[in-house]
Image: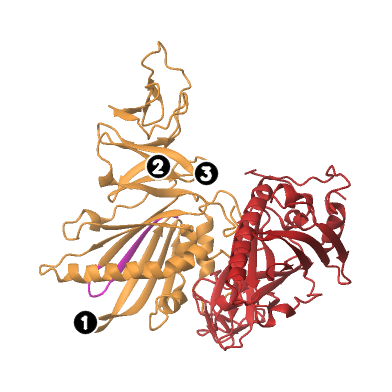
Amino acid sequence: MPQHREYPFPAYPNGWFCVAYSDELGPGAVQKLHYFGRELVLFREPSEAGAARILDAYCPHLGAHLGVGGTVEADGIRCPFHAWKWNGEGRCVDIPYAKRIPPNAQIGTWPACERNGFVFIWHHAEGAAPDYEIPEIAEIASGWTPFTKLEWTVTSRMYDMGENAVDHVHFKYLHGASGAPTNTQRLDEDGNLRNYSEMEMSTPKGPVPGSIESRGAGPGMGVVHVKGVVETIIVTKSTPIDDETVHVRFSYTQKQTDDERELRIGKAMLRDLKKQMEQDIVIFENKTYRTQPLLVPEDGPIAEYRRRARKSYSGRFWDE
Amino acid sequence: MSERFPYPANPNGWFRVSYADELKPGEVKPLAYFGTDLVLFRDAAGEAHVLDAFCAHLGAHLGHGGSVDGDGIRCPFHAWKWGGDGRCLDVPYANKVPARAQIKSWPVREKNGLILVWHHDRDEPPGWEIPDLPELSSDDWTPLDVRRWTVRSRWLDMNENSVDKVHFRYVHGTPVIPEAEITVEGHILTVNNLLKMTTPRGEIEASLTTTDYGPAFQTVHIEGAVDTLMVNTSTPIDGETTDVSFAYTVQKSPDGAHERVGRARIKDLEHQFEQDRPIWENKTYHARPMLAAEDGDFGAYRRWMRQFFSEAW
């Protein structure tokens, strides 16, 4: 693996990024997080419908990590070191041994939201407030299997990995897809990429017409809807851990069915999805980012991807 | 500098590199402290020496295969022999020893059952000495009972606990916050805590006195019911991890009762260490902590601590 790669773009895009699964954060639960090169603490308020909250990890008092031994109470999280209590807005609301709370006692807070069974954090390099929402995935409201969770830690950056979505040529040569799919792409009004491909899917009983529709929801999430033999949805989520590592989560669901054959095909598709990601990771972790790649007309719209993806970053790119 | 600590990894002072009884005459040990490779050996006359590990000749590690030969250590690679002062004493196949052949030799003291080295980032000579502790050479006290840990932290940060009276209540569950009296004399910091202890015979007044001699050698005297002495030492492995050792001794009693109470106390102290450890291993050092009026005197501790660094930070 290269010791050091220089990228001509910032490590962290602006947007909503997945930091946890809702079903792994029960009422009153605390998780230690490390994203955007920082230590953070995630906790859920103690009631069933309690909100998920994200704060900077280190207590402003004497620096203990709230995510290691901190305990949740109705109105905040209590530090394990000297029991200072911080609420979801980052205000100190109790110091059990002190007469007076220092008036400027405040810990950093991060906007958090929960959608589709995932907890998201809002990151913005300049501290701007959220300017879009993570959409509900309407299709999966009912009649779909519970999500299968796949996770990877990849030594790369999101901006570089994201090119894969428009790089339809690599499907043939890296993943062994048969023939180039027809491909139409458009930019939604909200700036997100929508990609629609039709192709023949090979099955033991011969080729079947199929389609893949993918749509972005900011830089941190995508929804891939596969139709053909069986209908599946993959929710892809990427979150920067630090300036050279990305946490990738894929959540896979299939339309409920009693058909043994469809279930089997679904399982095979899941295995294939894993295999493809592992093939991609070898490339991601060892490639460099070419500022001016040598392209042929038949390549995917790489340059357009780059222009569009840049909108998620603050400041200029080094190569501009 | 690391993200967690805004000050250099290695303070200036005396550091334990071994317990004395772990190194027999003629024995050689490789060491990794201060982010540096070192070799420790005891010469034939019984004196302990610490040198930089790598032979000045062609770079072999003297601690891996080197052997003690009289007053020095011989390299396993080409048999050059180095004295405890780091001078080359012999090159067996050469007519002449190169005049400038020298390996860095570290000042060493053997005291209180410990082998200590002096670390100074500008190589200044020792500015003070570790005192002899009479309890450790007295037959009235039990032999040292030694515990060791590798902790993902730095001792001077961990050791703020000694002035942090409030943490006893919330980390260790003492019923009240103890009173603490802090005095600083040069490199020596003393914290005297008065506290109530529960014993089988009821609650008694006890005192716990923590004395730091420089940045890495600490005694804790507990008086009341049974007198206990702890000798706490720590040596930086690298900027993130520290080799920490606590050694305990209690004043003997004819019926062995003190020894039993002492063993129970050691168990309790070990339990307290495990309560502190997750805090230590995950916390950061705030250069400007937000303090409440009731907190301990962190300012006094931090002013004391700064003298062990050559550069301001």
Q: Which amino acid does label 3 sit on?
A: Asp
Q: Which of A42 and B52 is in front in this view?
A: A42
Q: What residue type is labelled 1?
A: Pro
According to the image, label 2 marks what residue?
Answer: B31
According to the image, label 3 marks what residue?
Answer: B121
Q: Give the range drawn in magenta.
A: B215-227
Image location of residue A274, percent across then percent down: 61, 59
Indicate the secondary structure of the residue bearing disc 2: strand
Disc 3 from disc 1: Cα separation? 50 Å
Q: Which of A297 and A82 is in front in this view?
A: A297
Q: Quadrant of residue B197?
A: bottom left
Was residue B224 drawn as part of the magenta stretch in this picture?
yes
Q: How crowded is mark 1: few (under 14 residues within 10 Å), some or many (20 or more)?
A: few
Q: Quadrant of residue B247?
A: bottom left
Q: Can residue B162 be seen in this view?
A: no
Was residue B176 drawn as part of the magenta stretch in this picture?
no
Residue depth check, mark 2 versus mark 3: number of the one nearer the observer: 2
Q: What shade has chain A been given?
A: red
Q: What residue type is labelled 2?
A: Leu
Among the chains pictured, the one given orange colouring is B
Q: How crowded is mark 2: few (under 14 residues within 10 Å), some or many (20 or more)?
A: some
